[in-house]
């Protein structure tokens, strides 16, 4: 796990090494163990290392293979690197290190662009071919590792975070009206390749791109998700057995691909508890970590799940750490958490991840987490509600998912940023793609391949990496996801959703955890906006910077400020926080950038 950045010039000039230094410095928290740089004519790389596999200097980056004439910067982990290394050794390759980075170099040399099809892992990397003067960029199937791009006629820059590109200067920071519509309709999700800034794009998941020295680019999708039933039907027992086997293999790969201890983020829910139960017999002195928050008033949702996480930790005798965060600390730490967001996000979990990761990073460098299980195995309450609807697929989806309908969006956003209902168009197009048997198959495929990339996957990367902590997500193992995509929807939705995981959990973890109601774990102060949190958001939305930006219609802002707890999205997020967090992120990350292209 690391931070990467680079520049490729198309105009005959040499890369701006000072700008690259600024980009690398902005990524320092992602990789506190080592920094390095590399340049070759029109190309320059920067790298910040978090040492997880092969802790020796031989695995430092940028990694250059003089014999193959290739150079690499890489962020992520290739979980099957040992198997691939054995295969490459049989082909005659020799190795000077013992980690996964060098495996990428050899694999690219051996198999070209198709090397990514062999990788099991989370990754974003760039390979420079000194012979062909060509840059190869790639991103993992679910976009767990980010890769931001800024390209014009003179150059391409890339980085692991959007703020790193801004630190290099020369970025068009105008707001993208289409991206804004997605952002305010899909819980701050902006599907690739867009971002909220016109001058920054992101390489889509499951995609590779080659860039020649003259700027010519080729881009290909290397993996898609088939959500159709198998030709040979499986029995329920066979589905469950396959789920257990693939989850165990995913866990084992993620546990073994590390030369440092691995812990678990234990929320107290089914998913993380199952990870602990399956790992406990294989890890000595397993460390687990839980977080909870202070409530804001009588009758509000419970803001911790310690009752259940304590139960699991006791049963498996883990070395358990739990942290209760008071509201005054949440208020105090919000500015740095928002500044650390690589893109603005309204999810309460972003703040929770930031504060938890700070504490966890003092004990371990790598943790496993349960993110992705709800999307993959049908755990959210809105799935059966959508399924019960009639009418066009996009309408069934919209009624239970969109944060605000298009008419409300036009009421909220200033006329200068008005666009047609581009989010409905995007969702309709994605749902209608082939290779999905039913409406729910379409929805789950959209979730896993498009929406999940920005929420929750993005927070799994940028919040922990702000503290040099790597989070691995076994439920997004691509082979497990491929299996789940082929399951009959009724099997997933049984017993309130996630039936396959509940079934394989019986006898492994306590029934009280399996049978408990699904929790959604808010940070109450960001949902039930009162007191100092309301004053904070009022100050942001009534600030001179916000008014000068002219993004929001003032009557809509005033309506939300007058009664913030009356305005929630369909999945129960605060609309006031939604507006405030974008404006705050722009003030912290963008307003200091004055050199627009």
Image (spheres, helix red, strand yellow):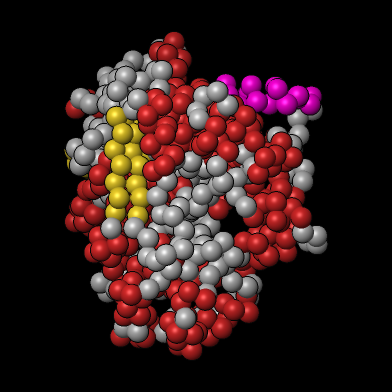
In the rendered image, which quarter is residue 468 located in?
Answer: top left
Residue 220 or residue 24, whichever sits in front: 24
In the rendered image, which quarter is residue 576 located in?
Answer: bottom left
Image location (x, y in percent) of residue 553: 48, 86
Residue 542: tell me if it is visible.
yes
Residue 79: tell me if it is visible.
no
User: Which residue sits at x=80%, y=62%?
Assistant: 391
Residue 20 or residue 349, whichever sits in front: 349
Image location (x, y in percent) of residue 510: 50, 30
Residue 570 higher or lower than 307, as above or below: below
Q: Is residue 242 left or right of residue 133?
A: right
Q: Is residue 300 left or right of residue 162?
A: right
Residue 450 or residue 359, whichever sits in front: 359
Helix, strand or loop: magenta stretch: helix
User: Which residue sits at x=56%, y=46%?
Assistant: 517
Q: Is residue 86 left or right of residue 56?
A: right
User: Which residue sits at x=73%, y=60%?
Assistant: 396
User: Which residue sits at x=62%, y=52%?
Assistant: 381
Image location (x, y in percent) of residue 252: 44, 22
Residue 267 or residue 244, whichever sits in front: 267
Residue 194 higher or lower than 275, as above or below: below
Quadrant where the image shows the C terminus: bottom left
Residue 416 higher or lower than 579, as above or below: below
Q: Is residue 234 magenta?
A: yes
- Extent of the magenta region: 232-246
In the rendered image, which quarter is residue 2 located in?
Answer: top left
Extreme residue toward the bottom, this view? 555
Q: Is residue 31 magenta?
A: no
């Amino acid at each position: 796990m690391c931070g990467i950045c680079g520049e490729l010039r198309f105009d005959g000039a040499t890369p701006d090494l000072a700008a690259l230094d600024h980009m690398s410095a902005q990524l320092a928290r992602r990789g506190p163990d080592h920094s390095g740089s590399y340049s070759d004519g029109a190309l320059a790389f920067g790298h910040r290392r978090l040492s997880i596999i092969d802790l020796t200097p031989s695995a430092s980056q940028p990694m250059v293979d003089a014999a193959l004439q290739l150079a690499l910067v890489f962020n992520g982990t290739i979980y099957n690197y040992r198997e691939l290394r054995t295969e490459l050794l049989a082909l005659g390759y020799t190795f000077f290190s013992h980690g996964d980075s060098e495996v990428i170099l050899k694999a690219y040399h051996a198999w070209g662009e198709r090397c990514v099809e062999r990788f099991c892992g989370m990754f974003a990397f760039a390979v420079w071919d000194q012979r062909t003067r060509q840059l190869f960029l790639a991103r993992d199937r679910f976009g767990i590792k980010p890769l931001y791009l800024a390209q014009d006629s003179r150059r391409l820059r890339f980085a692991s975070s959007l703020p790193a590109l801004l630190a290099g200067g020369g970025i068009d920071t105008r707001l993208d009206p289409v991206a804004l519509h997605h952002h305010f309709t899909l819980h701050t999700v902006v599907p690739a390749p867009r971002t909220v800034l016109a001058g920054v794009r992101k390489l889509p998941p499951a995609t590779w791109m080659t860039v020649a020295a003259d700027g010519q680019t080729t881009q290909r999708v290397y993996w898609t998700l088939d959500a159709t039933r198998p030709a040979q039907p499986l029995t329920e027992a066979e589905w469950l057995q396959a789920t257990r086997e693939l989850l165990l293999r995913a866990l084992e790969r993620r546990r073994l691909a590390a030369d440092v201890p691995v812990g678990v983020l234990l929320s107290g829910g089914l998913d993380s508890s199952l990870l602990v139960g399956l790992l406990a017999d294989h890890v000595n002195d397993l460390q687990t970590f839980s977080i909870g928050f202070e409530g804001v008033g009588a009758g509000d949702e419970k803001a911790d799940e310690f009752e259940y996480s304590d139960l699991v930790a006791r049963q498996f005798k883990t070395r358990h750490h739990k942290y209760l965060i008071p509201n005054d600390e949440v208020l105090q730490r919000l500015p740095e958490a928002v500044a650390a967001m690589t893109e603005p996000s309204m999810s309460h979990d972003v703040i929770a991840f930031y504060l938890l990761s700070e504490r966890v990073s003092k004990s371990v460098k790598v943790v496993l987490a349960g993110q992705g299980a709800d999307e993959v195995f049908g755990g959210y309450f809105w799935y059966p509600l959508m399924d019960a609807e009639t009418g066009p697929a996009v309408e069934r989806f919209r009624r239970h998912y969109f944060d605000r309908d298009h008419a409300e969006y036009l009421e909220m956003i200033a006329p200068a940023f008005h666009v047609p209902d581009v989010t409905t168009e995007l969702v309709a197009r994605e749902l209608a793609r082939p290779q999905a048997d039913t409406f729910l198959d379409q929805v789950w495929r959209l979730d896993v391949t498009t929406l999940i990339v920005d929420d929750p996957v993005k927070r799994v990367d940028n919040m922990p990496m702000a503290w040099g902590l790597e989070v691995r997500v076994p439920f997004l193992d691509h082979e497990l996801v491929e299996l789940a995509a082929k399951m009959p929807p009724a099997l997933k939705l049984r017993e309130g959703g996630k039936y396959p995981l509940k079934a394989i959990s019986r006898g492994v973890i306590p029934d009280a955890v399996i049978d408990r109601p699904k929790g959604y774990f808010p940070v109450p102060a960001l949902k039930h906006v009162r007191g100092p949190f309301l004053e904070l958001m009022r100050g942001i939305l009534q600030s001179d910077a916000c008014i000068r930006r002219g993004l929001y219609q003032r009557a809509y802002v005033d309506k939300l400020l007058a009664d913030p707890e009356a305005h929630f999205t369909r999945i129960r997020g605060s609309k006031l926080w939604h507006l405030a967090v974008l404006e705050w992120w722009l003030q912290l990350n963008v307003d200091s950038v004055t050199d627009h292209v």
